[in-house]
Amino acid sequence: MPRLPRKLSACSSPRKTEEPHVIQEAATGKYIVLFDPLDGSSNINANVSIGTIFSILERRPTGLGKDVRQNILQPGHRQVAAGYVVYGSSTVMAYTAGDGVHMCTLDPSIGAFVLAQENVRMPEAGRIYSVNEAYPQHLPHGHPTLSRLGQEAGNYSSRYIGSLVADFHRTLIRGGVFFTRQPPNRRKASWRLLYEANPLAFVAEQAGGVATDGQQRILDIAPQAMHERTPADHWQQG
């Protein structure tokens, strides 16, 4: 099973930190960690599953000194590892280091994650579509999921939790389609590219799925800012 990098140099949180936080000298650190520490936090009082999302990038060997921001703004296909933890009826971590997706479950009796499944694959034929349909004006016009899934003969069922990690985890396990609204102003799109879209896109592709912003592969988007946002679709269809 692939191992995650051990020596980390910097981390930044999109909700608490506007600037990168260096935890050791950037000149010697090899990796950059980006993470959303508590995705879905608005659902805590409703007892809905929430989670943590993380992305690991390798620092560019270009002599940038302490300017870690230039190392952070890398397209998602340069990630060396990514994944998430979902806190639900059990605590589950899914991650990839570029060689498939592996899933671990927290064993409280030993205080450690135990490997539960290697090489997780999205089912080839899912029967669930997931989207917040309260904003029909922001759904992509002519999107195939609207015409083929939600409006056809009951072949697909709608399931939407409203907690990104929980919705994505269900799609990973059961297959289907998960997508977000696309408002005219991209800055108001639902997902942060670096902290949410990129790591989950990496997991989706490594599990045999597809991840796109509606026009291009998410992992090919060149980020311009730490908190840049993007619409996103993840799906696996048979």
Image (tube, rainbow, N blue to C red):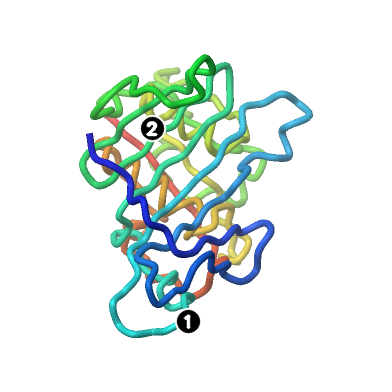
Most foreground residue, 146 or 47: 47
Q: Is residue 67 shown above or below 104?
A: below
Dot 2 falls on a residue whose secondary structure is helix
Tag shown at residue 228: none
Seen at 43% across and 72% down, the residue is 73
The x, y position of residue 84, in whole percent, is 46, 39
Q: Residue at image x 33%, y 51%? A: 5
Q: Is residue 124 left or right of residue 131?
A: left
Label pair 1/2, CB-CB below 8 angstroms: no
What residue did someone put label 2 on? 148
SS type, badge 1: loop
Q: How far apart in space, not on screen, are marks 1 and 2 (Cα)?
A: 47 Å
Q: Residues within 10 Å of mark 1 (few under 14, many from 20)?
A: few
Residue at x 57% of width, y 50% of height: 36
Residue 205 image position (x, y, % from top left): 28, 43
Q: Name the residue under label 1.
A: 67
Nearest the viewer among 34 and 40 is 34
The image quadrant where one finds the N terminus is top left
Q: Earlier in the sequence, mark 1 or mark 2?
A: 1
Above or below for 143 versus 26: above
Q: Is residue 128 above or below residue 148?
A: above
Which residue, as the protein is rendered here, is positioned at the far right? Answer: 45
Give how far across and how far down residue 121 sits, in percent: 26, 28
- Is residue 214 found left or right of 157 in the rendered image? left
Q: Pointer 2: residues within 10 angstroms few (<14), some, or many (20+)?
A: some
Q: In the figure, is residue 86 to the left or right of 147? A: right
Q: What residue type is labelled 1?
A: Asp
Q: Which amino acid does label 2 sit on?
A: Arg
Give the mark count. Answer: 2
Of the residues tagged 1 and 2, which is closer to the observer? 1
Quadrant of the image occupied by residue 44: top right
